[in-house]
Image (tube, coloured by chain):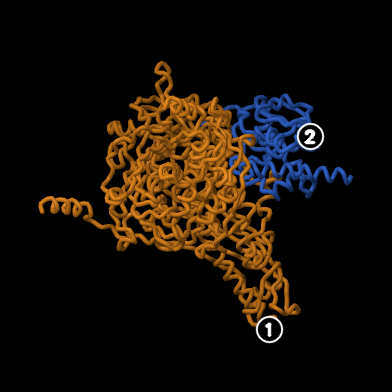
Chain colours: A orange, B blue
C-alpha cells in the first residue's frame, strides 16, 4: 500500500484511542453510573399480545416500602416515534397494548428490589383483543386494527416505484426467473443491556445519560413527550456496549426515568433485563420476497420486479424507512436497466421491528444473490463470471436514480475469487463440500435526515490552546465501531500530531455540535468530512502564524509528527505547541468549526430521498461449507471477503468491522431467529417470544466461528474523508446468500430462506432422494394490494428524475388505441 | 408515596474478601450475587453483566484463580475468597500482556464483553501457558462477543501467551 506512506496516521494500524479504558474496565457504560440520592425504576409489561387496558390500580404499589413514585399511561399524554410519520408509541401504554412486553406502568423506588416487589402489586384489568400473529393474518384481518393510522386495516405502509416499463423488459427477455424467498427476523443482541440515568438540574432542566446511538433524535423526542424546550434537555450518549441499530429508537424507559427525575428532583436509573431487551427489539424485519427477473441468454439482467412483505410488529419504529430499504438499494451492484419494487409493511402483535445492521437490505440482497446463483446454474455460467460481467460502473446512475461514485465491486470479486481458490473449488469439491459467492453494496450514510431539514448532518468544533492541547467536539456516538478513533485520526492527520494528542468529546447534546447519530453507516463520511473542514481551518491558522514566524511562504509549511516546519529547510522548525502559541498570539483564542451536508439526491420524484448516499461501499464474499448429509449439520471452515472501503483509516479497526460483520451474517444465515409461539389455550393463548434469553437465542460462539480472510480494496472516493467509505454494515450483507449458494454447491439443495438450519437441509435432502424439487422455502407469495407505482423513467431512457404522472393511464390508453386500430 | 415508613434494612450480610490483592469487608443484602456486590457495594463496575443468568460470560471474574460467572454466585458463598477482577489486571500503569495484546490486535471493539473475556483468558493462561488456538476458542466458548467475530480475540490471547512466555524465559 504505497498510498498509505504519504500519511502519518491514516492507513496505519493503531491502537484505538479509547482502547485503554476498554481493556482496564475504566470505561463507563450507562449502568456503571451512580449519583447521590439515586433511585431505581422498573417497568411493568403487558402479559397480553393485544388488549385494551380497562383499569390500573396502583394504590398498593404506591404504599409499598421504599416506593417513591408510580407512573402509568395517564402521566404521558403525548406519543412519540423516531420518524415524524409514525409517532405511535407512548412511554407507557395509556389504553392499548400491542405485544407481550409493552410497558404499562413504572415504579420508582429506593432500590431495584423494592421496585420489583411493587410491580407485582399493580393490578391491571385487560380486555383481550384478537391477536394478529403473522403478515398473512394482518392482510386477511383488516378489522381489529392494531393502530388507527396507516394505509388501511393493519397495513402500515405501502410503497411502489417503477423505473422504466418492467413488464415490457421481462416480455423481451430470453428467460424470466421467478422465485420466492423468506428472511426470518433476528435481533441485535448487544452485549450491554440498555440502561439510562436521568438527573434533574432544576428549573425544568435535566440530563439523561443513556446507551443510545442517536442522542440528537432522542433529545428531540424527549422534548416532544415531556413538552419541554429541547434546549433544556441534555442527552449524553454513554459509550455503548454494542448497538447494531438496537439503540437507535428513543425508548420507553428513557422517557420514564426522565419524567420521574423531573417529578422527584432526584436522579433515577433503569437498566433493562436481558428479557426486556428482547421485547424492546427493533430488530431485523421478517421479510417475504418475490423476485421476477429477466435475463438475456448470455447472462445480462433486463429488468426486475421485486415485491416485499414486511412483518413490522406492534409499532412503526423506523418502519417507513425499512420498507423503502427492502427495495431501493437492490440496483446498486449490477447493471439493471429497469426496476420495479412494491413493498408493504404490516402491523402484528409482536415487538416492533426496526433497523438492524444493514437495515432492510440484507433480506432482498439474500433473495437477489441466491436467484443469481440459480440463473448462473441454468445458463451454465460460472456464478462469479456472471456477476463480474455485469457489475455497475463507477460514476454512474442506476435506473432508480442512485448516483454511484467510486466502485470497487469488480476488484472485490476478482480478489475474493483469487484468494479463495474459487476456480479450483466451485463445482469441483467432493460431495458434501462446496463454495458459494455473493456480493452486496451499502450506503455511506443516508442522504436525507430522519426529519426534514436543510441543516448539516454533522458538525464538529475544535479548540486549541497554548499548551498544545487539541480538543474536538462532535455529537457522533461511539457504539464500539471506532467513531472516536476516526475523529481523532482525521484531526491528528490534518494537524500533523498523533491521535494521543487529540481529546475527543462526543455524543453530548449539551456541549457538542449536532451529529445525527450512529446509524446508516454515516459517521466516518459525515463526521469525518466535518472534522476535516474544522481541522483544515485550524491548520490554516497555524500555517499562517508559523510562516510569519519562520519567514517562509505559507505554502512551504508542513505539519507532521508534532512539528511545524518549512519543507526542505531543517533549521526553520518549531514544535506543534509553539505554533499554537504563535497562532493564539496572532488570532486570539483559537477555535474552528466544520460541518457536512450530503449532496442533493439526483432523483426528483417523491421519496427520491431514500437510498441516495454520498458514496457506496461494495463487498464480495466466498463461503466454504461442509454439509453432513446424515445430520444436516453445516460447518463453515472458512470465509473470504473483499470489501471496497475506499481507504482504511485504521486497518486494524476496519478488519475488525469486516470480521464482525461476517460473524453476524453467519449467525443470521445459520441460526439466529426472533420467533414467537402461542401459549396453550388453557394458559392464555398469548403470542409470546419463544426464546427471550441468550442461551436459547442461538448465536455464533468462538467455537463455531470460522477463520475469515479479509481483503480491503482501497479505491479512495472523492466524496469521503481521505477517500474512506463505510465498513460497519456492508460486509454483513453478502454472507447469508453466499452460505446458501455454498450449500447448493455442496449437496445440490436450495434453501430459499434463513436461517438455514440442519432440519431444513435434511428436509431438502430427503426431497432430493425422492426425486422431487430439492428446495425448502416459502411456496407462495400472498396477494398483496400494493399501491399504484410512482413511475419514473430511468436516466438511460431520457428521464429527468421526475415522476411521469399519468404513465399507467397512458399505457392503458395505448393498449386500447392499438386494439381499436 | 411512603416516605414515613421505616427504612429498609437489607445489608444484613457481612463478609471479608481479598479483592485484587486487597483485604476488604463488605455488608450487603444476603440475596445479592457476587456480581452485584462487586458492582454496587464495592464500586468495581469494570465487571459487566449481559444477562444475569449465566448465559453470556460478561461477568466472569477469577475466584481463587478459577474463572467463575459472578452472576451465578451468591456473595455470601465467597467469604474468605480471593477475587480478581479487571481492575486488578494491570500492574500499576503497565498493562498486563493480555490487555496490551487486546489493544494491539483489535480484541476489543465496544469493550463490553472485554473484562469477562480477559479474566477468562487470564484463568486459561495461568493454568495452561501454551494453549493451542482450538483450546483458546474452547476456553472462551462461554464468553459471548457481538462485535469482533472472535478472530481478533483469539489472535490477542495467542499473542499474549507468547509475550508472557517470553517474559518468563527472561526472568
| Disc 2 secondary structure class | loop
Count numbered badges in the picture.
2
Q: Which residue is mark 1?
A: A551
Q: Quadrant of the C terminus of chain A?
A: bottom left
Q: Nearer the viewer, residue A30 or A697?
A: A697
- Parent chain of label 2: B
Which residue does the image show at 71% across and 72% down from the upper left?
A578
Q: Which residue is mark 2?
A: B128
Q: Nearer the viewer, residue A600 or A643?
A: A643
**Callout 2: 10 Å neighbours few (<14), some, many (20+)?**
few
Which residue does the image show at 75% across and 77% down from the upper left?
A570
Residue A34 is at least partly visible in this image: no
**Which label number is shown at residue B104?**
none
Q: Residue furthest bottom?
A: A551
- Parent chain of label 1: A
Q: Position of residue A214 (x, y in %)?
A: 50, 49
Q: Position of residue A808 (x, y in %)?
A: 22, 52
| Disc 1 secondary structure class | loop
Q: Position of residue B147 (x, y in %)?
A: 59, 43
The answer to whether residue A524 is left or right of residue A297 is: right
Q: Are marks 1 and 2 on the same chain?
A: no
Q: Residue furthest right?
A: B171
Residue B24 versus residue A364 in the image, above or below: above
Given this view, does label 1 or label 2 mark the residue nearer the observer?
A: 2
Q: Position of residue A463 (x, y in %)?
A: 61, 65
Q: Quadrant of residue A7?
A: bottom right
Amino acid at each position: 500500500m504505497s498510498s498509505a506512506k504519504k500519511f502519518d496516521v491514516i492507513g496505519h494500524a493503531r491502537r484505538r484511542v479509547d482502547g485503554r479504558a476498554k481493556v482496564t474496565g475504566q470505561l463507563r457504560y450507562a449502568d456503571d453510573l451512580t449519583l447521590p440520592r439515586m433511585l431505581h425504576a422498573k417497568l411493568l409489561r403487558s402479559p397480553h399480545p393485544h388488549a385494551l387496558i380497562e383499569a390500573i390500580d396502583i394504590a398498593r404499589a404506591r404504599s409499598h416500602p421504599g416506593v417513591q413514585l408510580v407512573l402509568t399511561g395517564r402521566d404521558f399524554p403525548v406519543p412519540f416515534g423516531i420518524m415524524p410519520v409514525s409517532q405511535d408509541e407512548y412511554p407507557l401504554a395509556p389504553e392499548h397494548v400491542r405485544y407481550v412486553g409493552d410497558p404499562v406502568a413504572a415504579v420508582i423506588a429506593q432500590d431495584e428490589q423494592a421496585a420489583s416487589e411493587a410491580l407485582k402489586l399493580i393490578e391491571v384489568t385487560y380486555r383481550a383483543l384478537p391477536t394478529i400473529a403473522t403478515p398473512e393474518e394482518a392482510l386477511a384481518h383488516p378489522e381489529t386494527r392494531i393502530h388507527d393510522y396507516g394505509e388501511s386495516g393493519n397495513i402500515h405502509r405501502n410503497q411502489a416505484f417503477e423505473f422504466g416499463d418492467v413488464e415490457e423488459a421481462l416480455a423481451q427477455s430470453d428467460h424470466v426467473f421467478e422465485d420466492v424467498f423468506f428472511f426470518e427476523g433476528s435481533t441485535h443482541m448487544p452485549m450491554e443491556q440498555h440502561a439510562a440515568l436521568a438527573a434533574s438540574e432544576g428549573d425544568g432542566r435535566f440530563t439523561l445519560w443513556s446507551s443510545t446511538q442517536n442522542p440528537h433524535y432522542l433529545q428531540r423526542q424527549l422534548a416532544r413527550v415531556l413538552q419541554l424546550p429541547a434546549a433544556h434537555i441534555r442527552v449524553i450518549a454513554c459509550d455503548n456496549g454494542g448497538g447494531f441499530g438496537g439503540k437507535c429508537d428513543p425508548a420507553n424507559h428513557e422517557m420514564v426515568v426522565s419524567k420521574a427525575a423531573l417529578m422527584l428532583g432526584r436522579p433515577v436509573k433503569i437498566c433493562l433485563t436481558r428479557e426486556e431487551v428482547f421485547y424492546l427489539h427493533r430488530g431485523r424485519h421478517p421479510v417475504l420476497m418475490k423476485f421476477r427477473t429477466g435475463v438475456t441468454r448470455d447472462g445480462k439482467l433486463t429488468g426486475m420486479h421485486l415485491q416485499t412483505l414486511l412483518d413490522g410488529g406492534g409499532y412503526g419504529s423506523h418502519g417507513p424507512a425499512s420498507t423503502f430499504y427492502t427495495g431501493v438499494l437492490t440496483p446498486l451492484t449490477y447493471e439493471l436497466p429497469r426496476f420495479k419494487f412494491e413493498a408493504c409493511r404490516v402491523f402484528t402483535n409482536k415487538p416492533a421491528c426496526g433497523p438492524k445492521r444493514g437495515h432492510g437490505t440484507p433480506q432482498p440482497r439474500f433473495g437477489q444473490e441466491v436467484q443469481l446463483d440459480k440463473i448462473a446454474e441454468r445458463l451454465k455460467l460460472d456464478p462469479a463470471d456472471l456477476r463480474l460481467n455485469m457489475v455497475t460502473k463507477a460514476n454512474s446512475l442506476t435506473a432508480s436514480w442512485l448516483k454511484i461514485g467510486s466502485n470497487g465491486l469488480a476488484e472485490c470479486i476478482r480478489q475474493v475469487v483469487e484468494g479463495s481458490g474459487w476456480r479450483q473449488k466451485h463445482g469441483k469439491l467432493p460431495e458434501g463440500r462446496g463454495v458459494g459467492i455473493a456480493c452486496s453494496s451499502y450506503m455511506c450514510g443516508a442522504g436525507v435526515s430522519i426529519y426534514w431539514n436543510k441543516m448539516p448532518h454533522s458538525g464538529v468544533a475544535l479548540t486549541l490552546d497554548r499548551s498544545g492541547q487539541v480538543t474536538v467536539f462532535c455529537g457522533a456516538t461511539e457504539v464500539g465501531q471506532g467513531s472516536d478513533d476516526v475523529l481523532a485520526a482525521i484531526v491528528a492527520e490534518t494537524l500533523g500530531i498523533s491521535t494521543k494528542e487529540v481529546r475527543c468529546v462526543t455524543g453530548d447534546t449539551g456541549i457538542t455540535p449536532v451529529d445525527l447519530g450512529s446509524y446508516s453507516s454515516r459517521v466516518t463520511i459525515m463526521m469525518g468530512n466535518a472534522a476535516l473542514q474544522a481541522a483544515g481551518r485550524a491548520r490554516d491558522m497555524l500555517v499562517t502564524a508559523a510562516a510569519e514566524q519562520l519567514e517562509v511562504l505559507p505554502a512551504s509549511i508542513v505539519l507532521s509528527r508534532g512539528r511545524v516546519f518549512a519543507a526542505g529547510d531543517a533549521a526553520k522548525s518549531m514544535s506543534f505547541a509553539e505554533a499554537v502559541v504563535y497562532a493564539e498570539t496572532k488570532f486570539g483564542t483559537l477555535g474552528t468549526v466544520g460541518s457536512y451536508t450530503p449532496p442533493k439526491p439526483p432523483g426528483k420524484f417523491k421519496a427520491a430521498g431514500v437510498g441516495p448516499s454520498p458514496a457506496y461501499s461494495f463487498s464480495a464474499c466466498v463461503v466454504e461449507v461442509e454439509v453432513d448429509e446424515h445430520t444436516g449439520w453445516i460447518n463453515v471452515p472458512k470465509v473470504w471477503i473483499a470489501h471496497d472501503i475506499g481507504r482504511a483509516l485504521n486497518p486494524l479497526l476496519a478488519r475488525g468491522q469486516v470480521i464482525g460483520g461476517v460473524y453476524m451474517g453467519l449467525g443470521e444465515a445459520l441460526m439466529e431467529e426472533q420467533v414467537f409461539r402461542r401459549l396453550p389455550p388453557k394458559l392464555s393463548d398469548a403470542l409470546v417470544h419463544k426464546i427471550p434469553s441468550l442461551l436459547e437465542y442461538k448465536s455464533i460462539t468462538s467455537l463455531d466461528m470460522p477463520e475469515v480472510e479479509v481483503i480491503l480494496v482501497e479505491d479512495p472516493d472523492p466524496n469521503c474523508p481521505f477517500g474512506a467509505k463505510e465498513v460497519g454494515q456492508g460486509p454483513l450483507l453478502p454472507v447469508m446468500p453466499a452460505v446458501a449458494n455454498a450449500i447448493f454447491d455442496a449437496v445440490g439443495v436450495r434453501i430459499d430462506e434463513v436461517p438455514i438450519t440442519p432440519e431444513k437441509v435434511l428436509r431438502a435432502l430427503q426431497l432430493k432422494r425422492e426425486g422431487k424439487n430439492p428446495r425448502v422455502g416459502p411456496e407462495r407469495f400472498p396477494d398483496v394490494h400494493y399501491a399504484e407505482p410512482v413511475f419514473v423513467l430511468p436516466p438511460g431512457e431520457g428521464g429527468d428524475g421526475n415522476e411521469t404522472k399519468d404513465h399507467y393511464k397512458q399505457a392503458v390508453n395505448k393498449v386500447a388505441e392499438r386494439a381499436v386500430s | 408515596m411512603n416516605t414515613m415508613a421505616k427504612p429498609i434494612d437489607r445489608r444484613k450480610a457481612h463478609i471479608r474478601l481479598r479483592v485484587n490483592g486487597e483485604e476488604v469487608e463488605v455488608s450487603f443484602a444476603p440475596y445479592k450475587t457476587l456480581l452485584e456486590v462487586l458492582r454496587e457495594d464495592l464500586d468495581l463496575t469494570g465487571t459487566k453483566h449481559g444477562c444475569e443468568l449465566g448465559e453470556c460470560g460478561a461477568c466472569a471474574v477469577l475466584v481463587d484463580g478459577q474463572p467463575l460467572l459472578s452472576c451465578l454466585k451468591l456473595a455470601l458463598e465467597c467469604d474468605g475468597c480471593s477475587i480478581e477482577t479487571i481492575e486488578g489486571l494491570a500492574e500499576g500503569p503497565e498493562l498486563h500482556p493480555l490487555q496490551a495484546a487486546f489493544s494491539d490486535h483489535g480484541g476489543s471493539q465496544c469493550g463490553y464483553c472485554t473484562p469477562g473475556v480477559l479474566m477468562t483468558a487470564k484463568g486459561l493462561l495461568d493454568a495452561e501457558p501454551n494453549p493451542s488456538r482450538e483450546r483458546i476458542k474452547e476456553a472462551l466458548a462461554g464468553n459471548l462477543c457481538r462485535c469482533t467475530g472472535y478472530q481478533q480475540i483469539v489472535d490477542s490471547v495467542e499473542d499474549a501467551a507468547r509475550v508472557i512466555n517470553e517474559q518468563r524465559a527472561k526472568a
